[in-house]
Amino acid sequence: MYPHDNIFNIYYNIGKRLPFQVKRCEVGLQRSINWENRLSTKGRTFMVEKIEPKGKYGKAYGYSLEDNKLSEEYLRFYYPNYKAGEIVEIPCAGCGEWVLIDVPNVDINEIFPLHLPEEIMPFGKFKGKSLQEIYEAEPQYIFWLLDQDPYYRVDIPRLIGIAAKTDEEFKQICSEEYNRVFPKLTPHSIIKVGKYKGLSYEEVAAIDANYIKWFITNTNERVDYNSFQEIFAK
């Protein structure tokens, strides 16, 4: 469903439940830079109260919220004839830049249950394969899916043969497995590209510390910064 969708697709994906809260996250804006910002109720959001489908799209009606509080000032500015308490047509409802924030009085886990290892992937390069088969072949792909859509959840503990008895155990196992699949760079890691290819970061730090400092500051890879601070302190 994410990261780009319209209000009508969201409506169908949550089982036509009403009302539901959404935020428009246009590319390039501060509210769109990460999932924490996108899923936050901070800023302008809309509570969708009514959908009138027409083909793939249609019209969506609701009201505007600012920092999760009714924003009648916004409604009066854009809708001169607005009357207190009424719902209005939500602009750009068919644009593909909306994210789901909440479905009031409904457990999100009920709408988006855990995907189990035996489930078959219905899309993408692994279409037709079970999640278990995908994880055994390319575990990074599963975590990529999780990163793309915060409501796409996979039973990682079951994928690796561990039973999680509590939510805390579930989170801990997922975190540990993520660190295994995407290990952080440490001073002992080997450089894979560039002029120091084949040497460890620790070896290079001894002869060119500025290069290592520059690299770990600018890389997109996960870095164990504390371990690097230790070698720079020597």
Image: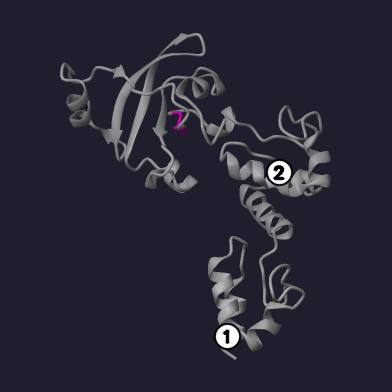
Q: State left or right for residue 72 relative to residue 38.
A: left
- Compared to residue 211, the image places residue 87 above or below, namely above
Q: State left or right for residue 182 relative to residue 149.
A: right
The x and y percentages for residue 102 are 45, 32
Q: Residues within 10 Å of mark 2 (few under 14, many from 20)?
A: some
Per the picture, the main secondary structure of the magenta-coloured stretch is strand
Earlier residue among tags 1 and 2: 2
| Residue beneath disc 1 | 232
Q: State left or right for residue 165 relative to residue 229.
A: right
How far apart are labels 1 and 2 at the CA level? 35 Å
Amino acid carrying mark 2 in the image: Ile
- Compared to residue 119, the image places residue 54 above or below, namely above
Q: Quadrant of residue 198?
A: bottom right
| Residue beneath disc 2 | 142
Amino acid carrying mark 1 in the image: Phe
What residue sits 58% from the left and 34% below the top? 109
- Region of the chain picked out in magenta, as a range: 99-103
Q: Quadrant of residue 47?
A: top left
What residue sits 65% from the left and 88% below the top? 206
The x and y percentages for residue 144 are 66, 45
Tell me the element at label 1.
helix
Q: Nearer the viewer, residue 212 or 177?
A: 212
Q: How many marks?
A: 2
What residue sits 51% from the left and 17% below the top? 16
Disc 1 versus disc 2: nearer the observer:
1
Q: Nearer the viewer, residue 138 or 96?
A: 96
What residue sits 77% from the left and 30% below the top? 127
Tell me the element at label 2.
helix
